[in-house]
Structures are given as structure tokens and as C-alpha cells.
Image: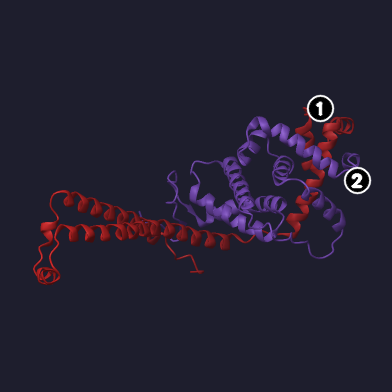
Amino acid sequence: MERSPGVLSPAFGAAQTGALDEASFQALYHANAQPLRAYLLHVCRRPDVADDLLQETWCRYLMRRRPDMDESETRSYLFRIATNLMHERVRSRVDSMLPEIPEHGRTPGLETRLDIRSAFGRLKPRERELLWLAYVEGMNHEEIAAATGLRLLSIRILLFRARRKAAQLLTPRPAQKRFA
Amino acid sequence: MKLHCEHESAVARAARTGFWPSALADHARTCPACSETCAVAAALLEESAAIRAANRPPDAESVWIETRRRARMHLRRRALFWFRALRTLAIVYIPVLLAWSMSRSRPTAAESVSSQISFDFSALLSGPAEKFALAGALLAALCITMGSWYLLREARTSLAHSPGR
């Protein structure tokens, strides 16, 4: 079968039967790249590592995707790949000797943001993942289980613990004013 | 504190969208679980907004090009695996074959030199040696076929849209 010039060969995964053209890839990328990158950056806390993992996430997605995936499954699958890549990276300890890259420039609210960042930095990566997926991405427990590979029954308790810990770390910030 | 409140997901959604029905806002003020959820969600959303404002992901085209490059590398690695396997088999196979052929005929040095000129190699490949040679040839053919398959797949991946190459 002859492929058109802008089509990526999908031959690497056994389950792969269709190709993704460049225009479809761009549409998919624009819908998911920013949330994915924000998630990666929040959990791994280094922009260079986040960019590298983002690139690898797309590579793995294109090599292993199933053509019958819908939008929600695709999103979940992308977060799953990103999460697995972060865990692989943590296990390999590639970045353990590198310092976290600080935010440059002074912008309004920077100190508050740094307080928040510092508070979340004291959580475990798994806790940061769970909280982000639940409260920023708005995933339900089933989706979080699919994205993290954890058991569905564990999500509730792990999320509760992570939330408790985060709330304690954020204690100086009054909760009441958020919905006043 | 109770583990879970039934309104927790509604509170998280309200924090995300900024739309607070008055009943839900009243509940969130009094419910410790929802209050905590609200505080954590608000902090995370603030962090998310800051990250998104300060960092833009790489453009789609460069990611696409890099993805194709990595895909080609991936195929090349797979092809190389089979050729390396073939090399390993050859390293094992050739000395074994030589040792076996030498042990089969042990002429003197002078006879050896003269006999090499008119040596009938096909005579060696009889009996158990035939199976051994056939197995080696089949393994070599398998490795070459597998490696070539990946190389051909790589060749079929068009590079027309890859200015980086």
C-alpha cells in the first residue's frame, strides 16, 4: 500500500491498522498538548523534562494508538502514557541530581504562586498526579484509574489522603474566600 | 473528617467553572470535605493558569517531525536487532563448523595443503551435518528476513515532509 507523504507509518504496533495524517495530528495536538504539558510540568516540575516527556508521549501514542479510540479514550490514553513515562523517569533517576528550574521574572502574584508551587512540591508525584487529574482535568474516578493505572477502589482513599495533605500545606490560604 | 461528600465533585466542578449555585456555596462553607476540596482545587487551578500562561507547548509541526524521526529510529533499532542476532549466530556457527570439519579429517600438514586444493566440501555435508547446516541456513534466512522487513517498512515511511532530515 502506498502512503501519502504526510502520513506517519503506523506499522510499529500490532494493534495498529490505520494511519494518522499530519492535519489530523495537528488537530489532536492542539486539543491536548497544553493540558498534557501543564500536567507534566506540575508533576515533574522541570520545563525541559516536561517538553521531552511531551514529545515522547506523542511518539508512543502514534506508535501504539488504536484507530477506534474516541476523543475521551484518546485523552485518557495520552494521560496514561504521560504518567507512565514520568514513572519510568523517576525510576531511572535521570533527573535526581538536577535542581528544579526556578521561574524567571517577577510578575504580579508571583510570591503567592511560588507558595502554591512550593506547597505542591512537597507532595509525592503520585499525589500531585491524582489531584491534578481530579481537580484541573475534571476526571472522575474511573478516568483517573485509567490514566494512572491504579485500581478504581484505591482512587478514593488516595485522593482523600492527597487532598488532606495538600490542604494542610496550603493552610495559610483561607478556603472560605474562594466562594464568598 | 468524613472521607467523601456526595457534593464534592459538584464543588470541584464549580471551582473549575466559576459558577457557584447559592445552595452549593452554602454547603461548601459548612462541609469540611467540600471546603478542603474547594481550597485545593482553587490552588491547583491558579497553578494551572500560571503554567499555561507562562509556557506554551512546542509547535505541532516540530513535534510531528521529531515523532517521525523517532519512529524511523525505532524501526532501525528493530532491524538491527535481527542483524546483530545473525552476527552472533555466525560467530558461534563458523568456529563450530570449522572445528567439526577439522576433526572429521586429520591429515598431515603437507597432505592438508595439497588436499585443500581439491577438497570436496559437499562430502562434509552429509548425515548429521546436513541437519546442522540446514538449521544454520534457516536461522540466517529468518534473521535476514526479519531485519529486512523492518528496513523495508522504514523505506516505505515517506520522508517528503521531513525538512529536518
Q: Is residue B34 left or right of residue A155?
A: right
At a point 23% along the width and 54% down the height, the residue shown is: B137
Asked which quadrant contains residue B60, the reply is bottom right
Tag 1 residue: B2
Task: Please name the residue shown 63% across and 33% down the image.
Answer: A151
Which chain is rendered red in the image?
B
- Distance Cα–Cα, label 1 vs label 2: 22 Å
The quarter of the rendered structure image containing the N terminus of chain B is top right
Q: Is residue B123 toward the left or the right of residue A61 in the image?
A: left
Colour chain A appears in: purple
Is B114 on the left-hand or right-hand side of A163?
left
**Residue B125: quarter of image:** bottom left
Few, some or many C-alpha atoms within 10 Å of disc 2 (few <14, some 14-19, many ≥20)? few
Q: Percent from the top left, x then y, of residue A79? A: 62, 46
| Dots 1, 2 in contact, CB < 8 A | no
Relative image position of residue A27 (x, y in whole percent): 58, 53
Q: Is residue B155 above or below residue B16?
A: below
Identify the disc placed on residue A172.
Answer: 2
Relative vertical location of residue B37 with respect to residue B153 in this rendering, above or below: above
Q: Front-most of A117 and B110?
A: B110
- Determine the residue positioned at 75% across, 50% down: B48
Whether residue A155 is visible here, answered yes or no, is: yes
Q: Amino acid at mark 2?
A: Pro
What amino acid is labelled 1 in the image? Answer: Lys
Residue B9 position by quadrant: top right
B99 versus A179 height, above or below = below
